[in-house]
């Protein structure tokens, strides 16, 4: 059955007038009600404060007092509805002592009967030790909100302050309101409350002790300890040296420093001077700052030696605890400052709100992995930007070689489709064909034009770091011009070779065997499928997504190889050393390190180009790969089958236009996705990138020839 307070709350929710709603709500406040009823009452009071409408006061006396207070405190932001409502609430309570006593009793009981450590220590901190555990935890919390009968301050805060802007208006509370709120908590306590209620400062101290223990435990764990810094083997002559080095770590001394602070606090409570307490607190602050610096070393180690999402999660959670401990320490030392409590409350509300966000968890823990993956692509992409004439001609040769390999790929593709196998098996064989061709290009150092944008975009994003100076802007613009010029050369090198060679192969095949590679019907169907009028642009854009995905997987593979130190395992493998010798094993390890990302990226790209269309067509929607180089070769074969009469067919020229759209969309989509990820991994603002567009257009209008041919001298070359 519903309690009396719950029934009254239902009637209160039906009211529309803000002032009457507050009167009705304060009238049913009962500090002796059950815990769940009091929690529900506080939640409704918080919702009334957050509602955002100005209170229509029906009392001239209240209006006069509010105007007087605002005149006395001109810094009070009248535009904040939450502040106005709190001011009106406090005025109504001052005029009704009975209501004020009940509200004060409910607030004190909330702090006394609820678990405050859960809010002070755990709000915003993931409970699970791994990334995916925390992910499912947040998904579950978003589906099942906490119940108000939980004796947990985190649950009450979650239900009371659920909006994004709550932390802002709490932190901006003016001084006069903070003083009156503190006075409300101390209004007419019962004798039993005075005897049984511990000061909130003790909760802060207990929470600080809890956090320092957790920080110390994580900092001394193997995943952090092994990455803070390695002891120089030349200086380590005894085992005890390693132990001494560990004892110098701030995590090892943190718990002792916290115990010293607690002992000094007890001495102050016994009447001793505060000098010792201030000394111990300053030492604790120093250790927390050193712990923060140590976490930076861990992230630097991860960046150099491979990134694991779970390790990033653990270290990021430790960093959050360090920041929380600093906030608690500041609030504990500034108990007489009302703004310190407001800042702490706002930080807890903001952290608790962030702890419910799945997007925040993913963004905060994948940023370093994204940066590592992007940096691999940036290092690789530098080789695909021709900054002078020699590099430009080299790129043309590499693209021509890639087009020559693609001729074989196109012929094998037609042979596979001519067998008319089951769709999934045909997709698998096509994927193997593509993967073999891409691997051959990789080891022959040839180039496939559409693979380059996903590699070169991170290179440009890395150069954004230096755009704060005119020289940096000029260097970035020069790189953009070189990139567009190189992409055009790569596409032309692929297409201008694959088209005529495929055409010649068809003619040669017909001359030798009196047969065609494909039937005339298949040739017509091929031209029709590439037409610009139809789904070709959409398919080309999706193909660009696959091209970008392969570069992402290649970066992940490179990170995995480095993270697990596979190169060292190969170089020091006993059997490899016995078989190849120490130098041979080292060369094998280096070769694997140099090619693992390329091999994985090319294999996955080939398999995706073959299998993804079959899978999507079977389970979602019709999809076919539209790759500019492969399609240009297919048109060459089809033209050889149909002969010169095909030049009069509109479908041929619509297919040529479709290949042009493929060239644009394959490159543009893969480049845009890679560039967006690179910018996000470097935490660059969108307006900073947008400001460079004018400089790029200015260079295009001033020196348009750079889009097609590099200048004779390359002052911006690197």
Image (spheres, grey):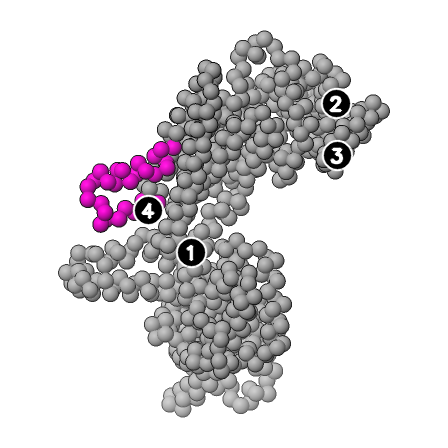
Residue annotated with mark 4: 229
Question: Do callouts 3 and 4 mark residues in contact (Cβ within 8 Å)?
Answer: no
SS under mark 2:
helix
Q: Is residue 506 above or below residue 203?
A: below
The stretch of residues the image draws in magenta is: 226-254
Q: Earlier in the sequence, mark 3 or mark 2?
A: 3
Closest to the observer, 280 or 241:
280
Q: Residue at x 67, y 29 (%)?
A: 175
State how far apart marks 1 and 3 are (Cα).
51 Å
User: Are the residues at dot 4 and dot 1 in contact (C-beta closer than 8 Å)?
Assistant: no
Give the crowd class for mark 2: few <14, some 14-19, many >=20 residues within 10 Å: some
Whether residue 417 appears in magenta in the rendering, the answer is no
Image marks 2 and 4: residues in contact by CB distance under 8 Å: no
Q: Are marks 1 and 3 in contact (CB under 8 Å)?
A: no
How busy is the neighbourhood of tag 4: few (under 14 within 10 Å), some, or many (20 plus)? few
Q: In this rendering, which labeled residue sits more in front, label 1 or label 3?
A: 3
Q: Nearer the viewer, mark 2 or mark 1?
A: 2
Q: Is residue 119 visible?
A: no
Residue sitting at x 61%, y 23%: 39
Q: Position of residue 532 (x, y in %)?
A: 60, 74
Q: CA distance from mark 3 to mark 2?
A: 19 Å
Q: Earlier in the sequence, mark 3 or mark 4?
A: 3
Left or right, residue 256 beside residue 589 = right
- Disc nearest the viewer among 3 and 2: 3
Q: Which mark is residue 74?
A: 3
Q: Residues within 10 Å of mark 3 (few under 14, many from 20)?
A: few
Q: Which residue in the structure is indicated by mark 2?
A: 91
* Marked residue nearer the N-terminal end (1 or 3): 3
| Residue annotated with mark 1 | 372
Q: CA distance from mark 2 to mark 1?
A: 57 Å
């Amino acid at each position: 059955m519903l309690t009396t307070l719950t029934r009254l709350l239902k009637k209160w929710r039906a009211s529309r007038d803000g002032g009457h709603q507050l009167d009705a709500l304060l009238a049913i406040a009962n500090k002796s009600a059950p815990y769940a009823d009091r929690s529900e009452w506080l939640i409704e009071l918080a919702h009334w404060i957050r509602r955002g409408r100005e209170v229509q006061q029906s009392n001239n006396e209240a209006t006069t007092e509010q105007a007087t207070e605002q005149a006395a405190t001109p810094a009070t932001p009248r535009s904040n509805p939450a502040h106005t409502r709190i001011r009106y609430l406090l005025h109504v309570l001052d005029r009704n002592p009975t209501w004020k006593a009940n509200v004060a009793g409910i607030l004190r009981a909330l702090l006394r009967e609820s678990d405050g450590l859960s809010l002070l220590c755990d709000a915003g901190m993931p409970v699970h030790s791994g990334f995916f555990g925390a992910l499912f935890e947040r998904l579950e919390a978003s589906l099942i909100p906490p119940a108000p009968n939980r004796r947990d301050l985190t649950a009450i805060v979650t239900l009371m302050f659920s909006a994004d802007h709550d932390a802002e208006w709490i932190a901006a509370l003016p001084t006069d309101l903070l003083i009156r709120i503190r006075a409300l908590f101390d209004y007419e306590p019962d004798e039993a409350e005075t005897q049984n209620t511990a000061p909130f400062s003790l909760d802060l101290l207990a929470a600080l002790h809890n956090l320092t223990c957790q920080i110390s435990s994580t900092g001394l764990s193997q995943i952090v300890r092994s990455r803070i810094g390695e002891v120089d083997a030349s200086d380590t002559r005894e085992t005890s040296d390693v132990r001494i080095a560990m004892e110098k770590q701030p995590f090892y001394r943190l718990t002792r420093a916290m115990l010293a602070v607690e002992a000094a606090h007890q001495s102050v409570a016994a009447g001793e001077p505060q000098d010792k307490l201030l000394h111990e607190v300053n030492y604790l602050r120093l250790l927390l700052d050193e712990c923060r610096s140590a976490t930076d070393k861990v992230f630097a180690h991860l960046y150099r030696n491979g990134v694991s999402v779970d390790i990033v999660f653990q270290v990021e959670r430790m960093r959050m605890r360090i920041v929380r401990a600093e906030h608690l320490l500041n609030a504990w030392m500034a108990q007489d400052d009302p703004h310190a409590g407001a800042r702490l409350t706002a930080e807890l509300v903001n952290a608790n709100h962030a702890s419910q966000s799945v997007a925040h968890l993913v963004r905060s823990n994948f940023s370093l992995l994204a940066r590592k993956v992007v940096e691999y692509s940036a290092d690789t992409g530098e080789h695909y930007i021709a900054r002078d004439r020699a590099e430009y001609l080299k790129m043309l040769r590499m693209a021509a070689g890639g087009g020559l390999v693609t001729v074989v790929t196109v012929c094998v593709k037609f042979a596979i489709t001519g067998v008319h196998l089951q769709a999934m098996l045909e997709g698998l064989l096509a994927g193997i064909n593509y993967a073999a061709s891409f691997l051959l290009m990789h080891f022959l150092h040839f180039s496939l034009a559409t693979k380059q944008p996903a590699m070169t975009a991170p290179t440009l994003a890395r150069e954004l770091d230096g755009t704060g100076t005119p020289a940096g802007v000029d260097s970035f613009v020069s790189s953009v011009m070189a990139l567009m010029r190189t992409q055009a050369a790569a596409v032309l090198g692929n297409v201008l070779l694959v088209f005529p060679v495929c055409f010649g192969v068809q003619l040669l095949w017909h001359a030798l065997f009196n047969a065609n590679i494909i039937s005339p019907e298949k040739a017509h169907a091929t031209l029709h499928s590439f037409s610009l009028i139809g789904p070709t642009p959409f398919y080309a854009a999706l193909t660009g997504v696959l091209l970008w995905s392969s570069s992402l997987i290649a970066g992940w593979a490179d990170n995995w190889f480095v993270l697990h130190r596979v190169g060292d395992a190969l170089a020091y493998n006993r059997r490899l050393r016995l078989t190849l010798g120490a130098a041979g094993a080292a060369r094998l390890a280096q070769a694997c390190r140099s090619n693992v990302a390329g091999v994985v990226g090319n294999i996955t790209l080939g398999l995706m180009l073959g299998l993804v269309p079959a899978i999507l067509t079977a389970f979602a929607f019709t999809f076919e790969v539209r790759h500019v180089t492969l399609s240009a070769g297919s048109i060459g074969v089809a033209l050889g089958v149909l002969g010169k009469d095909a030049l009069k067919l509109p479908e041929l020229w619509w297919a040529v236009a479709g290949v042009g759209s493929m060239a644009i969309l394959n490159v543009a989509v893969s480049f845009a996705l890679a560039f967006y990820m690179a910018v996000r991994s470097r935490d660059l603002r969108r307006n900073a990138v947008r400001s460079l567009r004018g400089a790029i257009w200015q260079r295009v209008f001033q020196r348009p020839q750079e889009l097609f041919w590099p200048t004779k001298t390359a002052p911006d070359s690197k």
